Amino acid sequence: MTSAVPINQQLVLVTGGGRGLGEHVVSALLREGARVVVNFLNSAERAQALADTAAGRAMAVRADVSDARAVRSMVEQAQEHFGMAITTVVNNALPAFSFNGDLRPHADTLTWDHLHQQFQGIVQGALNTTQATLPGMEAMGFGRIINIGTNLFQNPVVPYHDYTAAKAALLSLTRTLSHDLGPKGITVNMVSGGLLRTTDASSATPEDVFNLIAASTPLRRVTTPEEFADAVLFFASPWSRSVTGQNLVVDGGLVKN
């Protein structure tokens, strides 16, 4: 069993890596020398352009993470291309969603379809990537699963019922998987952010909301995607080799975990 592998010796899968927060996570990993699989669903040009910034160390692959067969095919394709197993997964893919409090479903309009869409993309997606990469991690005796969460289930300043419920379920899965996979040398953790300035998902957020959140944090500013991505690197690095089942909140101190 290998307790730690440097980032520059890892093959990392980042779901939803072609745009938004995922794009910044991919860039941070490439900066540290990792080989990266840039998963995308609709952002083909952006994903390919990002992969092209690190020729030979990145490839863009289309797959719907809620489709187990497509995920397995993506993993097989990537592992054959790089000649090594994917040992680190960043579950970042987000079903179509906009952080717009005015347009969110309220308690009287929320439907199971809203919830199912988010659970399918967030929870089922993470399950699919975990199961598809597990054989390679087990063979290596090393693995890192990093789930992207939210501080909204601790501080629902805007009650996005569907999105928040799915992310809360992902946190539970993070904790239970950490027990199951720990003996295999695989850690499972979550990094949770608040509103980030600015991603595609937060582009519809009014400036007043950004200002309110900034004023509420000890750092008096809204966390950037670059700052959040650097925190993700911690869980991929050897420095986190004894950390599993945890949820690190990266929001400038707004939520005390």
Image (cartoon, rainbow, N blue to C red):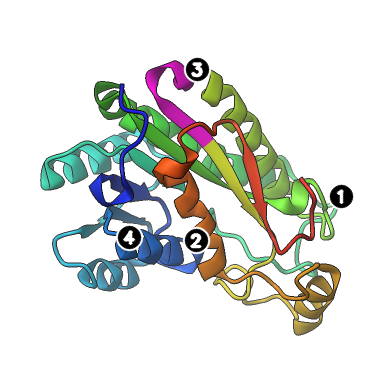
Q: Is residue 115 left or right of residue 102?
A: left
Give the total of numbered labels.
4
N-terminal label among 1 and 3: 1
Q: Secondary structure at mark 1?
A: loop
Residue pointed to by mark 4: 32
Residue pointed to by mark 2: 229
CA distance for labels 4 and 3:
29 Å
CB contact under 8 Å: marks 4 and 3: no
CA distance for labels 4 and 1:
44 Å
CB contact under 8 Å: marks 3 and 2: no
Residue pointed to by mark 3: 180
For residue 135, above or below residue 158 = above
x, y percent for residue 40:
36, 58
Q: Secondary structure at mark 2?
A: helix
User: Of the residues shown, which amino acid type is indicated by label 3?
Assistant: Asp
CA distance for labels 1 and 2:
33 Å
Residue pointed to by mark 1: 107
User: Of the residues shown, which amino acid type is indicated by label 4?
Assistant: Glu
Q: Quadrant of residue 165?
A: top right
- The range drawn in magenta is 181-188
Residue occupying the point 44% across, 16% down:
183
CA distance for labels 2 and 4:
12 Å
Front tag of 1 and 3: 3
